[in-house]
Amino acid sequence: MAEIVRMPKLSDTMTEGVISKWLKKVGDKVKSGDILAEIDSDKATMEFESFYDGTILYIGVPDKKAAPVDAIIAIIGKEGEDVNSILAEEKKKAPANGKAEEKKEEPKKEVPKKEEKKEEPKKEVVAQQQTSNSKQQTVSHSTETGKVKASPLAKKLAKEKGIIINKLKGSGDGNRVVKRDIEMFLHSGQSNTFVGTESFTEEDVSMMRKTIAKRLAESKFSAPHFYLTMEVDMDAAVDAREVINGAMGVKVSFNDLVIKAAAGALRQHPKVNSSWLGDKIRYNNHIHIGVAVAVEEGLLVPVVRFADGKTLTQINGEVKEFAKKAKEKKLQPSDWEGNTFTISNLGMFGIDEFTAIINPPDSCIMAVGGISQKPVVKDGQIVAGYVMKVTLSCDHRVVDGATGAAFLQTFRQLLENPVLLLGANAI
């Protein structure tokens, strides 16, 4: 008996998927476990396995096309088996609601009334067209009988190039402006009009971009955001990183230090490590930090789990692996689910300061700018120092200003005093 293969739900927020590429075609024999296709979910591109043995009898969704979750994308069965009855049965189920809706709209037909009213709008449209045509004839007539004498081709070129034709001297009979006058004017350098070509390209919105738009719009318009910005003295952190990477033979980034400091601050301020659930607030005892990673189609947020208990090198290794998997579209749902707090770092792109939109279900997200050297006051003296700005976006339904400020103070204290951050076995 033929088996239906339906569009799978590859994440909790997925409503439709795109067949990125079929790896099998109609007539191919497949076994359970064989990869049938690559499917773009709202998060990543994932390989889709067959659950059945048999021959592919039908493919319902071609490459690069979308289909809703649970829609038929293929049928697998015995070679030569008829699939028309299966498809017919599926059609009976699908349009049932649609037919009911169409029947509801049928009483609106009122044929006599529509026929009576059809004539009047048509007359109005004809009248409007006649008026418009008469205006065009008037414009054309005034141009022909104006002071400027020009050939039709010269007028056309002047209009295309944005040239005021009555400013030109004609070289034709009776000072008539001709094509060569337009061309000479363009090449003489007298024209201050840049001649360019308008063009554009369009592409379908990817599933990832659709989800980003939907989720962040919901966050921005439902959660009352407020923002707290703080400057951090990074001199000690810069020195500590140099010692770690040089003397201990390991490599850590400033982003690793930021994640570790944020995890330490969250442990001391659990109200920031929380979620708004409508009728209650969830305060998470575990600390899972989402780290925003930019990919070609948008933004993914893989999660460093139990970040407060991990060493800097463990954090560094995980983030690097996540970035690699994200770019190769190999992240799995387990990689991006469960965040309790999010960090978005654009410092490596030369951004000094920015604000970020909260990543649900978190109540806060921290935007991290770049580290720059500038004049600072230390012990009453102006000296060069390294500084970094961070901005905490907070959901005011959960986190108050004083709570967010206290979290940032602890975060700054940990980065400015790495000895507090780098306790036993921290590297």
Image: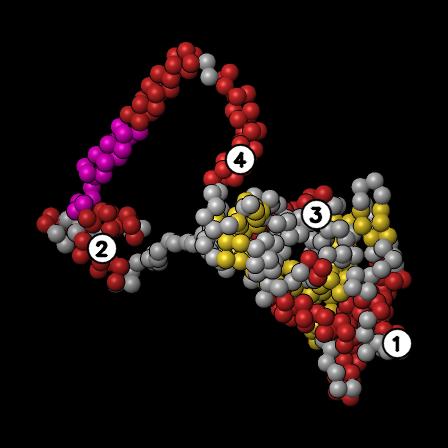
In terms of sequence position, does the residue under pointer 4 or pointer 2 come before the other? 4
**Relative side of 381 to 330, left or right:** right
Q: Which disc is residue 346 wearing?
A: none
> Is residue 287 something that shows in the picture?
yes
The tag earlier along the polypeptide, 3 or 2, is: 2
Residue located beneath label 1 in the image: 423
Name the amino acid, label 1.
Gly
Q: Which residue is mark 2?
A: 182
Q: Residues within 10 Å of mark 2 (few under 14, many from 20)?
A: many
Q: Which residues are magenta?
A: 132-152
Can residue 234 be seen here? The reply is no
Q: Secondary structure at mark 1?
A: loop
Left or right: residue 267 versus residue 27 is right
Tell me the SS state at disc 4. helix
Above or below residue 387? Residue 22 is: above
Magenta: main secondary structure: helix
Question: Which quarter of the rendering shows the N terminus?
Answer: top right
Q: Give the mark toward the camera: 3 or 4.
A: 4
For the C terminus, give its image quadrant.
bottom right
> Badge 3 local density, few (<14 within 10 Å), some, or many (20+)?
many
Q: Identify which residue is drawn at 38% across, 14% down.
A: 115
The residue depicted at 75 percent of the width and 86 percent of the height is 249
CA distance separating discs 1 and 2? 78 Å
Give the amino acid at mark 4.
Answer: Glu
Q: Nearer the viewer, residue 52 or 42?
A: 52
Q: Residues within 10 Å of mark 1 (few under 14, many from 20)?
A: few
Decide whether residue 141 is among the magenta residues: yes
Q: Provide the residue designation for mark 4.
A: 89
Q: Quadrant of residue 147?
A: top left
